[in-house]
Image: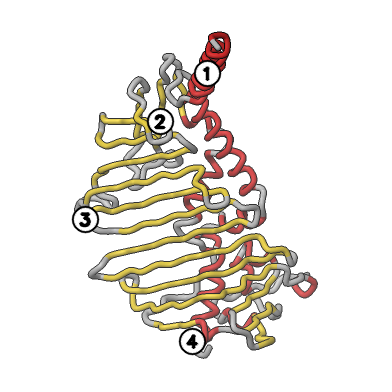
């Protein structure tokens, strides 16, 4: 009986030791835990950015204001999807370059549908100014780019008063490349609420959001299957001297690591929600950017528990240019807005 008790005690002791060893290896307070988490988080981020940047949709998002088609100034319009729905196919119009031609004249409505489906050559959407210019070989181009708008309205009264929605699927060479979602409300009384996202067909999504007020909040997020790999959030207090006012709190999350700047010299780092008291964060603003971030004039250095340091620009150096491009693109998704919107304006005004 005594031997049985000793044997049982030994088994319990071995079990306790095994549990303790297992617990210690997963404890987030181990000296290397923060460094390992940040390394893993930045590697996942770099993988995501590379996957997005290699897609054709990413190139479309990078189209800038300087390369887009503009068609004058619109003072008032209330354009619902029901008014503009249908299939519209690009048809080359043999004419010299002219900004006076209405965009709708370069498209033929081929069917009535519940959506607005616009098809045109990919080469034309990459250089929207060429839409109104006939070039030799245009008649041989296939309409291999399609944007299918499933929800839309454009209630425009002025630059400071409008309500806008554009939700659409994008297809290239009959393959879905992603889904666009833009919602924007600007009101003289309530201010501005803007949100845009592009869900790439490979499972990654880029999101940007902005909401004005006494405390203005802007954020930029990269997700994989709905889980944030990277998120920057900036909160500012209203000021008369700058659009984003005076910085109140800046937060950067990469995987399980969150960095928080609450004041000029008050920086904190968290691992899975736990404050890391031995780690040190230094943030340097390189200029007076109105919306400072990692991709806009901000450098962040972390000193780990073991005394070693790392800078974010080094950890994500291969991705920083593409992150910047996505950050800028989601502020104004020109490739979709100018083709869909200006066709909508032409239909609305019966041009």
What residue do we see at 58% from left, 63% from top?
A: 179
Q: Earlier in the sequence, mark 1 or mark 3?
A: 1
Query: Label 3 near label 2: C-beta < 8 Å?
Result: no
Residue 34 rendering spot, x and y as whole percentages: 46, 26
Residue 214 image label: 3
Answer yes or no: is residue 148 visible: yes
Residue under numbered circle 4: 348
In which image quadrant can residue 198 be found? bottom right
Q: Tell me which label, 2 or 3, sits earlier in the chain.
A: 3
Residue named by callout 2: 300
Question: Which of 81 and 157 lies nearest the eye of the viewer?
Answer: 81
Left or right, 281 with respect to 168, comes to: left
Asked if labels 4 and 3 touch by Cβ distance under 8 angstroms, the answer is no
SS under mark 3: loop
Observer-side mark, 2 or 4, equals 2
Q: Is residue 230 above or below residue 238?
A: above
Label at residue 12: 1
Measure the C-alpha gap from mark 1 to mark 2: 48 Å
């Amino acid at each position: 009986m005594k031997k049985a008790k000793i044997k049982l005690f030994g088994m319990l002791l071995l079990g306790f030791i095994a549990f303790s060893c297992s617990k210690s290896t997963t404890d987030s307070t181990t000296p290397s835990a923060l460094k390992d988490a940040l390394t893993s988080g930045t590697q996942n981020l770099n993988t995501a950015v590379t996957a997005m940047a290699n897609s054709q949709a990413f190139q479309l998002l990078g189209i800038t204001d300087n390369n887009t088609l503009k068609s004058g100034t619109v003072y008032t319009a209330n354009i619902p999807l029901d008014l503009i729905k249908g299939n519209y196919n690009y048809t080359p119009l043999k004419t010299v370059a002219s900004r006076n031609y209405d965009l709708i004249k370069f498209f033929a409505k081929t069917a009535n549908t519940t959506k607005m489906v616009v098809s045109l050559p990919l080469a034309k959407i990459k250089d929207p100014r060429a839409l109104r210019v006939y070039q030799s070989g245009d008649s041989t181009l296939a309409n291999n780019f399609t944007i299918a708008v499933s929800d839309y309205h454009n209630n425009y009264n002025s630059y400071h008063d409008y309500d806008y929605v554009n939700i659409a699927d994008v297809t290239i060479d009959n393959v879905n490349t992603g889904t666009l979602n833009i919602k924007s409300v600007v009101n003289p009384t309530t201010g501005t609420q803007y949100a845009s996202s592009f869900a790439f067909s490979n499972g990654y999504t880029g999101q940007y959001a902005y909401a004005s007020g006494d405390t203005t909040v802007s954020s930029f997020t990269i997700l994989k299957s709905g889980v944030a790999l990277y998120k920057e959030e900036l909160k500012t207090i209203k000021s008369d001297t700058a659009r984003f006012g005076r910085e109140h709190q800046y937060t950067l999350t990469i995987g399980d690591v969150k960095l928080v700047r609450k004041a000029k010299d008050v920086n904190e780092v968290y691992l899975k929600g736990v404050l890391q008291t031995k780690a040190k964060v230094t943030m340097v603003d390189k200029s007076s950017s109105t919306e400072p971030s990692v991709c806009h004039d901000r450098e962040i250095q972390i000193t780990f528990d073991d005394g070693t340091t790392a800078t974010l620009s080094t950890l994500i150096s291969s991705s920083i240019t593409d992150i910047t491009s996505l950050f800028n693109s989601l502020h104004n998704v020109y490739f979709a807005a100018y083709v869909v919107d200006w066709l909508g304006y032409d239909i609305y005004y019966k041009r």
